[in-house]
Amino acid sequence: MGDPQFIHRYEIARERLEGDFGLRLVPMPHALSGSRFIEENPALRAQDLMDAFRDPSIAAVFSAIGGDDTIRLLPYIDFDVLRRNPKIFMGYSDTTVNHLMLWKAGVASFYGPSLLAEFGEYGEMFPYTKRAVADLLFSAPAQYPLLPAPEWTDDWIPWEEKNRDIRYRMKPDTHGYEVISGAGKVRGRLLGGCIDVFPMAVGTAVWPPLCDWEGAVLFIETSEDKPGPEWICYILRGLAAQGILGAVSGILVGKPLGEVYYEEYKKEIIRVVVDEEHRPELPVFYNVNFGHAKPIGVLPYGVLTELDCEERSITFLECPTAG
């Protein structure tokens, strides 16, 4: 996060968190040390995380960005520290591993915006994302309808760009939520993340046991690498082999970045869930705004959620910040 070519994104995020949300941003001791330092010191990254949770003056922990090696922190994580000091944690992508750490510790978390990507966005923060953060972190809704974003973009603005006023070209979303499988209503607790990360987590101490997946609503999304449709098939078959696809009550699938492989991904999901696992009754909601889509909302880990196929609606049935 401290790389010279990207530090301006951190400054934008700091100003936005303070100006728009009334928060004071406190970087942990090693957070601004640069990419090379971060890569070479997983133990110090874990120490920053542990210290952030120990510190009673810190109300929430925001992930700076994802990456590809958060799993390397696992040997240095003290799950008792997480368990004894629950607080808001938010991020996505490779941060899926952190969410799984917190799940193991019994602590709720939020699969949502990261510091450099969404909070540090040029021009303005996407209104859809800003509203989701305000609604779910700063209010206490007993129930919350997760609405589809009315617009999206496939623009890419390089992070080295220094023009803070540059903006994305938005286009109307013509899909809304697509129910590509299933019928009726189901309920379950949200559990999932970025499927690019799943292979690193499977078999480790943080991968949820099958009993945790029983009745859960699995949410999955793909990274900026835009993996091919065959990757979706491989990951879903792996989940099926573990018994997970047979255990969950529903599936949420994030909008692919830039809608690349939009139709192809759907075909692979139907191939595995319906044709191979013989679960045509399993509700699968497609084109949900979380993860690497632009814009994204917030999914609270572990919150009881209802999927209504007829209404094409997603509703959180609990207050995600309660307790």
Image (spheres, helix red, strand yellow):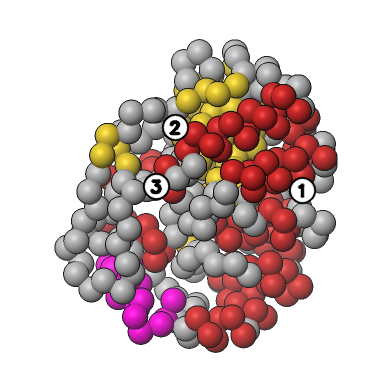
Please state if 75 lies on the left or on the right of 22 as rendered: right
Characterize the local packing of mark 3: few (<14), some (14-19) or many (20 or more) Cα atoms within 10 angstroms. some
Q: Quadrant of the C terminus?
A: top right
Q: Amino acid at mark 1?
A: Pro
The mark lying in front, picked from 3 and 1, is 3
Kindly report the distance in space between the C-alpha atoms of the residues bearing marks 2 and 1.
25 Å
Q: Nearer the viewer, residue 174 or 15?
A: 174
Characterize the local packing of mark 1: few (<14), some (14-19) or many (20 or more) Cα atoms within 10 angstroms. some
Q: Amino acid at mark 2?
A: Leu
Q: Amino acid at mark 3?
A: Gly
Can the viewer see residue 304 in this picture?
no
Residue depicted at 74% across the width and 64% down the height: 80
Q: Is residue 121 above or below residue 257?
A: below
Q: Quadrant of the N terminus?
A: bottom left
Q: Secondary structure at mark 1?
A: loop
Q: Secondary structure at mark 3?
A: helix
Residue occupying the far left of the picture:
165
Please provide the residue range marked out in magenta. 1-17
Q: In the image, residue 30 lies at what x, y percent?
A: 52, 83
Please state if 57 lies on the left or on the right of 6 as rendered: right
Residue depicted at 62% across the width and 85% down the height: 40
Q: Is residue 99 magenta?
A: no
Whether tag 2 and tag 1 are in contact, CB under 8 A, the answer is no
Disc 1: which residue: 208
N-terminal label among 2 and 1 = 2
Disc 3: which residue: 258
